[in-house]
Amino acid sequence: MSKLEKLIVDRGPIKEIGVLGMGYVGIPSAVLFADAPCFTKVLGFQRNSKSSSYKIDMLNRGESPLKGEEPGLEDLISKVVKAGKFECTPDFSRISELDAVTLAIQTPFANPKDLEPDFSALIEGIKNVGKYLRPGMLVVLESTITPGTTEGMAKKILEEESGLKAGEDFALAHAPERVMVGRLLKNIREHDRIVGGINETSTRRAIELYSPVLTAGKVIPMSATAAEVTKTAENTFRDLQIAAINQLALYCEAMGINVYDVRTGVDSLKGEGITRAILWPGAGVGGHCLTKDTYHLERGVKIGNGQLDYPEGSDSIYVLARKVNDFMPVHMYNLTVAALKRIGKEMKGSKIAMLGWAFIRDSDDARNTPSEPYRDLCLKEDATVNVHDPYVVNYPGIEISDNLENVVRNADAVVILAGHSVYSDIKADWVKRITGKENPVIVDGRNIVEPDEFIRNGFVYKGIGRGDKNEHLLM
């Protein structure tokens, strides 16, 4: 029996758990741990900062600080708080009380061009864990990280701060989150869990931690670096798929056809050995994961020790896909300019009603939202821009209204950037009456409205991938 195995046997089964980072990943993870009968206590760690301290009080009252539709989350928070199994605290010294600690802290890129991630928040979290680490504990990184980080930077910091040795005195693993906003609890329970330890003992201990919260999902064990690559690659592949349909949408616009007809046709080809994972085009890709995980994967290759054999001088198809998706808000702006031109107006002096600040349907998640670069382009050309979103309450430096009528009133162009359900109910005659314009502009980035209804009512219509309608006659 190894030293670490003996320490774990002496400590016994995992009973008390800590989760660092009370966000879209940390909160549902923590309360699911707390709801598992085999665990006795879960602490959620949150810095008592000006921007985030409100989460501590809300969680300890049994309330969710996350807005938008998250089925079952607030009920589960309330349940585990009332049962005395979950508590949120800013006191990181309490890490020493625990058997296992997970870190769910964001890892953005300040500038993707130089492939240098901003690990400052994660490093702070790792240092806090290291200071209070005790022999036999398990540390798991859930954050999406550059391949090699667990066995590299994280291991080094934990050892320096604790004076202990990873793999001998404590277990260390990577178990990446695989959730989507709007279905957090469901995803954690039902998606297979990738678990990669720095050695077999670490992997087994991490499997013990995650197995009790899985319902339909199963654990897939591998090495820590393989787990890191799995997470970055799955998001990179999804980004690539979105870029493929976005580029097809641009092609269809240029050829005067409907991308949704083409998509239906492609998707209809089914049978053994046939795979057509064709997604949906849109106004841009947002969120914390897809917008940066490609760069983690690229960086992992560059800092690794192996030799990459790849066509000389060729761009990475993954980075090119990122560029296509980053272009979509620019394309939305170009469609808006073209539509305004048809009614003799320029962007300068026009009033733009932006519908949707969150990047995902019926959510308050506005991280890296494509709405922001679109707004910036409009403001640069001296347009007046008003933003509506029923879910996003606060966003730094942006005034957002939940009053749709006020935002649409007197607008020259109404631009749909998010697929919120409420926008599906918008009627052309209502929009025309509120704008007060003879020929208002509607630009649909999510295929929400029925083009012919708006065209019949005198609108100038433009839509992503709607080459069949974008050059319609003005009525």
Image: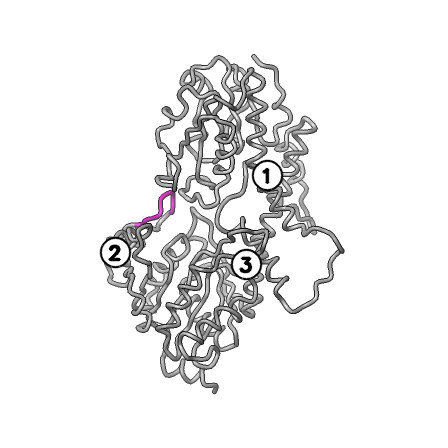
In depth, the one of 350 and 335 nearer the eye is 350
In depth, the one of 397 and 319 nearer the eye is 397
SS label for mark 1: helix
SS label for mark 3: helix
Amino acid under label 1?
A: Phe
User: Who comes first in sequence, dot 1 or dot 2?
Assistant: 2
| In front: label 1 or label 2 | 1
Residue that appears at 53% across and 27% down:
443
Amino acid under label 2?
A: Asn
From the image, tell me which residue sits under label 1.
327
Question: Local crowd at mark 1 within 10 Å, few (<14), some, or many (≥20)?
Answer: many
From the image, tell me which residue sits under label 2.
60
* C-alpha gap between disc 1 and disc 2: 42 Å
In depth, the one of 291 and 28 nearer the eye is 291
Instruction: Give percent across and percent down for residue 310.
Output: 73, 58
SS label for mark 2: helix
Instruction: Give percent across and percent down for residue 253.
Output: 65, 29
Report whether 428 appears left or right of 66. right
User: Is residue 141 placed above or below 4 in the rendered structure?
Assistant: above
User: Who comes first in sequence, dot 2 or dot 3?
Assistant: 2
Question: Local crowd at mark 2 within 10 Å, few (<14), some, or many (≥20)?
Answer: some
Secondary structure mostly taken by the magenta-highlighted segment of the chain: loop
Q: Which mark is residue 231?
A: 3
Is residue 186 one of those drawn in magenta? no
Residue 211 location, quadrant: bottom left
Report whether 398 appears left or right of 450. left
* C-alpha gap between disc 3 and disc 1: 24 Å
